[in-house]
Image (cartoon, rainbow, N blue to C red):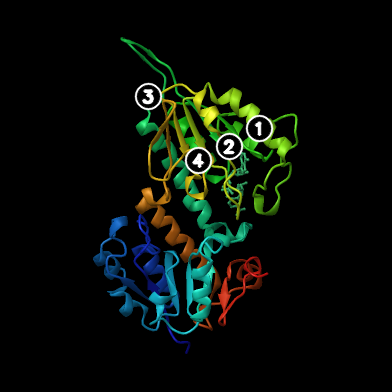
Amino acid sequence: MPVERRIAVLKERASGETRVSATPETVRKLIGLGGSVAVEAGAGLAASIADEDYRAAGAQVGTADQVLAGAQIVLGVQAPDAVLLAQAAPGAWVVAIHDPFGRRERVDALAAAGFEGLAMELMPRITRAQSMDVLSSQSNLAGYKAVIAAADIYGRAFPMMMTAAGTISAAKVFVMGVGVAGLQAIATARRLGAQVSATDVRAATREQIQSLGAKPIFVENVAGIEGEGAGGYATEMSDEYQRAQAELVSSHIAKQDIVITTALIPGRAAPRLVTDAQIATMKPGSVIFDFAAPQGGNVEGTVPDQVIERHGVKLMGFANTPAQLPADASALYARNLLNFLTAFWDKEQGGPVLDDEIGEAIRLTRGGQVVHPRLLG
Ligand code: NAD
């Protein structure tokens, strides 16, 4: 008989983190797989989940040390520090968002303590891993929230309204960066009745923009990214492209009311897309939401979690956008982790066993060593 796997769900410790890595629904299913689940008291409170709901789903609820005692699998949203995990089983899996390039010291400490860190944000973008893709599930919600937050501080309405007192014209929304977050931002702004345009460096997004009823704005004279490169991610563009893009943006942005920027390049600082001089051409009262604010910002002057006014334009961005929707973000994140553990659960072993493709992509540490190729050499 295999030994029952003990799964610990920790309360998040990072400031501003409201999400939780398991919900009563996923707890029930993890137990159904053959695990036992222990949840740290208060772990779900910020996501509107009471300890009692976890208990009703079959989890034990206790202090961090109690839930970690002998745990072979530790679940988190943001990876916990190794010092917290002293009670966990030797070699335990730590399944979370590790931010390994930004928080290398945390990875080194997990290695030194002998844990196996699994970075969910490094999940390969292959069809069978789509249901485990935390970047997609969280970016999708964040793209929605970006538009809602911008609409909330914009002093005008989004839809066109014809009233007895006169007509209000529709807001003009420009989305820069059309990945998962950008697509949801376009869809949300359209639902609110805005006139939407969007741009990206990847040619494949042109059709996606059109299919959502928005207008594509593309650099035409310099080649962008034609095919879908590694996992569909963008790379840094040439100087020539960046100049052409800046010119195009300058002429377009002056006519916009709301700009939502979501451009990211994995493992790099976010590309700068909007300069202070460009902001100065916008109408007073316009709003720019910089989704990339915590990665260095697409927009000059944004500060995470603050509304900054420049030339009469409000600049904003959250340090942690998915954390603004704790209940839904937790529900989807928890299902990503459940799908991951379920896909690899081996009945005979009584626990998950990774295959090479996904294991090598997400495993940061094992056997006391840092093992991820991107962290070596
Ligand atoms: P991302 O968060 O890395 O970047 C957001 C967007 O910014 C991307 O569309 C990128 O092209 C764009 N960008 C980068 N530099 C830019 C610049 N200078 N100007 C304008 N735009 C710029 O991307 P993402 O949301 O993770 O999605 C990337 C791709 O991966 C998409 O095509 C998405 O559909 C695909 N994807 C595939 C899977 C899967 O197959 N499992 C899962 C999720 C996403």
Q: Which residue is mark 2?
A: 273
Q: Nearer the viewer, residue 221 or 137?
A: 221
**Mark 2 falls on what kind of element?**
loop
Q: Is residue 342 visible?
A: no
Tell me residue 36's x, y (percent): 38, 77
Please state if 33 lies on the left or on the right of 217 as rendered.
left
How would you rate the neighbour count of disc 1 (Cα within 10 Å): few for under 14, some for 14-19, many for 20 or more? many
Nearest-to-viewer mark from 4 and 2: 2
State yes or no: Cβ of the residue under disc 3 lies below 8 Å from any atom of ligand 1. Answer: no
- 80, above or below 335, in the image: below
Q: Amino acid at mark 1?
A: Gln
Q: Nearer the viewer, residue 319 or 226?
A: 319
Nearest-to-viewer mark from 1 and 4: 1
At a point 41% along the width and 53% down the height, the residue shown is 329
Q: Which residue is mark 1?
A: 245
**First along the sequence among labels 4 and 2:** 4
How would you rate the neighbour count of disc 2 (Cα within 10 Å): few for under 14, some for 14-19, many for 20 or more? many
* Count of numbered marks: 4
Q: Quadrant of residue 58?
A: bottom left
**Mark 1 falls on what kind of element?**
helix
State yes or no: Cβ of the residue under disc 1 lies below 8 Å from any atom of ligand 1. Answer: yes
C-alpha separation, residue under disc 4 versus residue under disc 2 = 20 Å
Nearest-to-viewer mark from 1 and 3: 1
Q: Which residue is mark 3?
A: 157
At a point 36% along the width and 62% down the height, the residue shown is 23
**Mark 4 falls on what kind of element?**
helix
Tell me residue 227's x, y (percent): 73, 45
